[in-house]
């Protein structure tokens, strides 16, 4: 488990120290972008809670005791994992049944650990049921809620969890993973791959499929910044016609423009790119929350910087 994790050493070391000093909170909230390793850290912590080597100073379980072997084989009965994007697995009945089980004595003795991934997608009813257990957890029960956007969780849940923040992976960390696992296809720019991954390893296995789209978007954005008004109008029309992919398309454009802002040496061009970046940041809320016409907004914002 430990050798699968990239980065987050400070958080992992602190969790190890809290566990060793018996001050580990029973309810924790792991916050950060998707694909950066929050769940892996949660599972590493779970293994440390199960590990029978209580005097161990190193991060991770010993890997030798009976519980570590059960954990690594996927057979430990006191670990519960739910992806809250799965509405059937995270419905009211399932959450209620989970909490009833957690309140029983641990099957193997010792700790019970519950990992709720994408916890911000719990329904209000499920959150209310969970809240009762978070308010008065058993001494041997631990809950780790993994989220991208904690603002979507009820304040009552947030107030009962200690928050742990996880940063996006650095370019060097992503580059190291790509090199170590030989993930870079021949003829592909590693810088384009790093930009596209945007601090996350989510989707790295399917990166080749996304590179053509990324390359096309990069070309279109560069033409817009060069003053091509016709291209701006056509691109806005194309993007707005595919509503299902629009949010992802806007995110991709923001990554490309951000890279341009960081790498542009000409002050005038950098200002143009920064202005476009600011306009792209506001489009999500205007299109998806206020429901303003997407094509009109895109055309006005893209042309505004020419």
Image: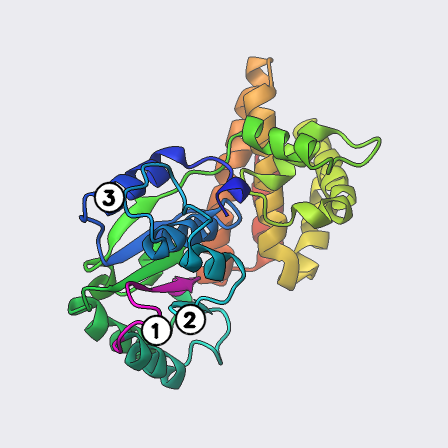
Can residue 31 be seen in the rendering of this structure?
Answer: yes
Can residue 230 be seen in the rendering of this structure?
Answer: no
> Which residue in the rendered view is the most extreme toward the right?
187
Determine the secondary structure under disc 2.
Answer: loop
Determine the secondary structure under disc 3.
Answer: helix
Residue at which label 3 appears: 20
The magenta span reads: 103-119
Q: Which of the marked residues, 2 or 3, is nearer the chain's N terminus? A: 3
Q: Residues within 10 Å of mark 2 (few under 14, many from 20)?
A: some
In magenta segment, residue 105: yes
Q: Give the Cα separation between the discs numbered 1 and 2.
A: 6 Å
Residue at which label 1 appears: 107
Residue drawn where x is 75% and y is 42% of the image:
211
Q: Which of the marked residues, 1 or 2, is nearer the chain's N terminus? A: 2
Q: Is residue 16 left or right of residue 119?
A: left
Contact (Cβ within 8 Å) of mark 3 with mark 1: no
Mark number displayed over residue 77: 2
Mark number displayed over residue 141: none
How is the rendered protein coloured? rainbow
Contact (Cβ within 8 Å) of mark 1 with mark 2: yes
Q: Is residue 264 left or right of residue 18?
A: right
Residue drawn where x is 73% and y is 53% of the image:
238
Residue drawn where x is 55% and y is 23% of the image:
262
Determine the secondary structure under disc 1.
Answer: loop
Residue 257: give x, y in percent of width and height. 59, 33
Residue drawn where x is 34% and y is 53% of the image:
52
Contact (Cβ within 8 Å) of mark 2 with mark 3: no
Q: Give the Cα separation between the discs numbered 3 and 1.
A: 23 Å
- Indicate whether 125 appears above or below 265: below
């Amino acid at each position: 488990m430990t050798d699968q994790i990239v980065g987050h050493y400070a958080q992992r070391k602190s969790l190890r120290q809290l566990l060793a000093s018996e001050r580990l909170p029973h309810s924790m909230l792991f916050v950060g972008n998707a694909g950066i390793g929050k769940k892996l850290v949660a599972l590493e912590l779970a293994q440390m809670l199960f590990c029978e080597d209580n005097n161990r100073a190193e991060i991770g379980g010993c890997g030798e005791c009976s519980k570590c072997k059960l954990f690594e084989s996927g057979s430990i009965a006191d670990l519960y994992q739910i992806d809250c994007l799965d509405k059937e697995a995270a419905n009211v009945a399932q959450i209620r049944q989970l909490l009833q089980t957690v309140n029983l004595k641990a099957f193997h003795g010792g700790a019970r650990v519950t990992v709720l991934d994408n916890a911000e997608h719990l329904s209000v009813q499920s959150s209310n049921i969970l809240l009762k257990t978070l308010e008065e957890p058993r001494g041997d029960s631990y809950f780790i809620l993994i989220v991208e956007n904690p603002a979507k969780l009820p304040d009552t849940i947030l107030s009962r969890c200690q928050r742990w923040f996880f940063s996006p992976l650095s370019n060097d960390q992503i580059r190291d993973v790509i090199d170590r696992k030989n993930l870079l296809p021949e003829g592909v720019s590693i810088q384009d791959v790093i930009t596209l991954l945007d601090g996350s390893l989510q989707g790295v296995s399917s990166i080749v499929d996304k590179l053509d789209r990324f390359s096309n978007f990069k070309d279109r954005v560069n033409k817009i910044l060069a003053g091509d008004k016709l291209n701006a109008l056509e691109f806005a029309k194309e993007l707005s016609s595919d509503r299902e992919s629009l949010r992802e398309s806007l995110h991709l454009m923001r990554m490309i423009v951000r890279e341009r802002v960081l790498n542009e040496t000409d002050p005038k061009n950098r200002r143009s790119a920064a202005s476009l970046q600011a306009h792209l940041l506001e489009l999500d809320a205007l299109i998806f929350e206020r429901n303003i016409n997407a094509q009109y907004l895109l055309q006005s914002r893209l042309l505004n910087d020419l």
